[in-house]
């Protein structure tokens, strides 16, 4: 399995929270979902935000359905850089005013959607996805700059990227009537996939060196743009079972966490309002005996537990041959781990609902900022939705989410 989440074409990804969201301790826990409403049955992953004027009422109905059925207070979505450009793939020049390079109609759509979120009682995490994290000459075989759709990254892409992040944030905050509907902006993007977690982990020396430079150049600009809270790039734990990762110590699988913590908090002394991480079930402990969530909290500091958001919660299985986690069958589990797994799951099955319930328990146990689930609806060949393409809800998952709500103090 590919442990980087790939964007589906140029689809939009979304996260939503309680109105008036403020960082951390005073904020009720986020309880949300990746919001990907399928507004055209004949066209999966239709870019609804790009055409919001034509499908606004349909999207509002989907969002109201999600709130009424799931009792969520939070949704997550990606804003992809090609949609924000007046003449894609031409990106902004460093320091260029937003009015000279942006698709202002799209940014106005984003502001209108955020105001609709406010009216419906939710607020949003907005994941800003820029592909220009590293020069297009680095890992050129995989760089999405060659697509002709995403902008080309020059030798110093952090300059143009900082201009893009600042331009989008400040334009939208200026034009939205209810900026409090923005729970947080998240600095995202991947040079290969576009809308996915950036490569923050060790193992690709050329990539990681340029990524560190990018983060240290861009994060201070991103953090100071606008007034709403800022989330660090989403960190990805690596649970791949390939030969390279199987030969690494457990701590190496968390290098995205140790790297980003060092760059933002230790080196720059500019910690985020929120940390965010892609979540997987049954990793605390994993079959190697290592408690990965505990180690993550040790890296970030227990004092930051209420600032850590669990993202992309998985309820769907994937092939054990590509992953060290015991998502499906028990084959290959040692007796000691099988006993530990039974203890940690406390009787939960490894059903879809059981996977969610395990993650909910861990989020509460470690005192997190909350979570969002992947995803709201099935789309195309992706059958990972809480409701299917026809709109039918997967009731076992709905019941698990409502049970989590009722279990909170």
Image (cartoon, helix red, strand yellow):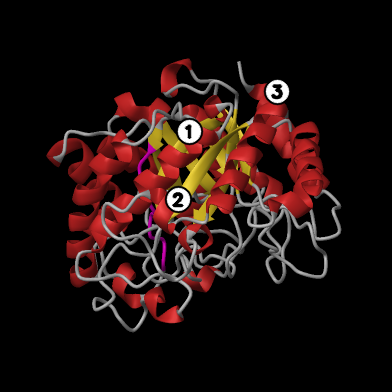
In reply to whether residue 238 is colored magenta, the answer given is: yes
Which residue matches tag 1? Answer: 174
The residue mark sitting in front, 1 or 3, is 1
Q: Residue 128 carries which label?
A: 2
Q: What x and y, as percent, mark residue 30?
A: 56, 30
304 relative to 270 in the view: left or right: right
Name which quarter of the figure residue 189 lies in: bottom left
As helix, strand or loop, the secondary structure at mark 1 comes to helix
Q: Can residue 347 be seen in this view?
A: no
Residue furthest to the bottom: 141
Horizontal and vertical percent for residue 179? Answer: 52, 28
Q: Is residue 17 left or right of residue 237?
A: right
Name the residue tied to disc 3.
406
Choose mark 1 or mark 2, whichever is in front: 1
Nearer to us in this view, 346 or 409: 409
Which of the two residues, 407 or 112, is positioned nearer the viewer here?
A: 112
Residue nearer the viewer, 334 or 395: 395
Cα–Cα gap, marks 1 and 2: 17 Å
Distance CA(mark 1)–CA(mark 3):
37 Å
| Magenta-tinted stretch | 231-240
The C terminus: image quadrant: top right
Q: How far apart are marks 3 and 2 (CA)?
A: 32 Å
């Amino acid at each position: 399995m590919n442990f980087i989440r790939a964007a589906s074409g140029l689809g939009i990804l979304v996260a939503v929270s309680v109105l008036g969201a403020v960082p951390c301790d005073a904020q009720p826990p986020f309880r949300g979902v990746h919001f990907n409403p399928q507004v055209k049955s004949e066209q999966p992953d239709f870019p609804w935000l790009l055409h919001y004027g034509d499908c606004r009422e349909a999207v509002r109905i989907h969002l109201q359905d999600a709130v009424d059925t799931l009792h969520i207070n939070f949704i997550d979505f990606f804003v992809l850089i090609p949609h924000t450009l007046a003449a894609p793939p031409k990106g902004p020049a460093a320091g260029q005013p937003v009015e000279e390079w942006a698709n202002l109609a799209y940014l106005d759509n984003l502001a209108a959607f955020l105001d609709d979120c406010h009216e419906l009682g939710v607020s949003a995490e907005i994941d800003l996805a820029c592909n220009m994290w590293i020069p297009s000459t680095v890992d050129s075989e995989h760089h999405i700059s060659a697509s002709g759709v995403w902008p080309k990254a020059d030798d110093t892409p952090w300059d143009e990227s900082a201009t893009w992040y600042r331009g989008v944030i400040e334009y939208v905050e200026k034009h939205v009537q209810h900026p409090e509907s923005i729970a947080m902006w998240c600095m995202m993007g991947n040079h290969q996939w576009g809308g996915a977690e950036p490569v923050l982990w060790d193992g690709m020396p050329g990539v990681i060196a340029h990524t560190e430079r990018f983060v240290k150049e861009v994060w201070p600009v991103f953090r100071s743009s606008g007034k709403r809270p800022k989330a660090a790039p989403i960190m990805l734990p690596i649970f791949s079972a390939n030969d390279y990762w199987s030969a690494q110590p457990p701590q190496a699988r968390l290098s995205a966490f140790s790297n980003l913590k060092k760059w933002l908090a230790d080196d720059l002394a500019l910690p985020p309002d929120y940390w965010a991480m892609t979540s997987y079930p049954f990793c605390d402990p994993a079959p190697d005996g290592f408690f990965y969530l505990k180690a993550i909290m040790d890296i970030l500091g227990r004092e930051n537990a209420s600032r850590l958001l669990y993202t992309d919660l998985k309820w769907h299985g994937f092939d054990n041959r590509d992953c060290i986690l015991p998502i499906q069958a028990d084959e290959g589990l040692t007796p000691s781990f099988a006993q530990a797994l039974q203890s940690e799951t406390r009787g939960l099955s490894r059903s879809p609902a059981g996977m969610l319930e395990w993650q909910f328990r861990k989020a509460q146990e470690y005192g997190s900022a909350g979570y969002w689930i992947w995803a709201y609806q099935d789309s195309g060949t992706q059958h990972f939705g809480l409701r299917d393409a026809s709109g039918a809800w997967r009731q076992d998952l709905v019941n698990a989410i409502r049970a989590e709500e009722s279990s909170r103090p």
